[in-house]
Amino acid sequence: MTESCVQVVRELLYAAFNAGEISTLAFDLFYSSVFTNFSTGMTKAQKIEMVIEDAEKYGAIPILIQYVKKQNSYQYDRFAERLEVCYSVQKPDKAEELLPIHDRPSYFADHLPPYNDEDQSWYTAGFPTLIEIDAERSQVLSKEVDVVIMVATEVELKAVMCLLKPYPKRRTVLQTYRGQRLII
């Protein structure tokens, strides 16, 4: 995006909204990446810069412009000709229209790289040998165990398992279930 196009969007936001309304825009569209980083005493211009930076980073300028068009059509119309030179404004799918940008399925499909366990810094090729023990045996051993690791998701399990090694002088790691919880 050229600097002149960024300037047009900056001017549009400045004309269309007051500082409180910029906060509302950030809450509605960029909650986790922008709104949560706003701080007391930030100027309207600082908030606008954060919004534009995030929208530009994630290719969401057209969604931002559509939001302005919906919230303040008068100011949008004033800038429409200048905006058309820079952007083709496409309305988001009806189902995604009310979602913040980061919650839209198309956002993730278009902006996040694929996740592969093998690409993570914690990944190693093999898991330690596991021995599954029953609840009764785990009760007996619980008096001797110094560390218990509980995980909530499969990704967490894989991350832990890749780094886990048997206790010194042991060849295996024990695993048991308490209800539906896996305990290693």
Image: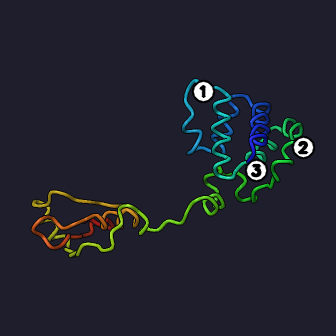
Residue located 63% across and 40% down the image? 27
The kind of residue on which mark 2 rests is: Glu
Please determine whether, in this image, residue 14 is positioned above or below residue 115.
above
Residue located 23% across and 75% down the image? 129
Q: Which disc number belongs to residue 69?
A: none
In front of the other: 25 or 94: 25
Q: Quadrant of residue 161?
A: bottom left
Sequence order check, earlier mark of 2 and 3:
3
Please determine whether, in this image, residue 97 is positioned above or below residue 13.
below
The kind of residue on which mark 1 rests is: Met
Give the residue number, with chain letter if any, for mark 1. Answer: 42
Sequence order check, earlier mark of 1 and 2:
1
Q: Nearer the viewer, mark 1 or mark 2?
A: 2
Q: Quadrant of residue 7?
A: top right
Give the residue number, with chain letter if any, for mark 2. Answer: 81
Give the residue number, with chain letter if any, for mark 3. Answer: 62
Sequence order check, earlier mark of 1 and 3:
1
Q: Nearer the viewer, mark 2 or mark 3?
A: 2
In the image, taking residue 82 as reference, residue 125 lies left or right, namely left
Estimate how packed mark 2 is, as few (under 14), some (14 to 19) or many (20 or more) residues with alpha carbons within 10 Å.
Answer: few
At mark 2, the secondary structure is: helix
Pinpoint residue 154: horizontal percent, then vertical percent.
40, 67
The colour style of the image is: rainbow
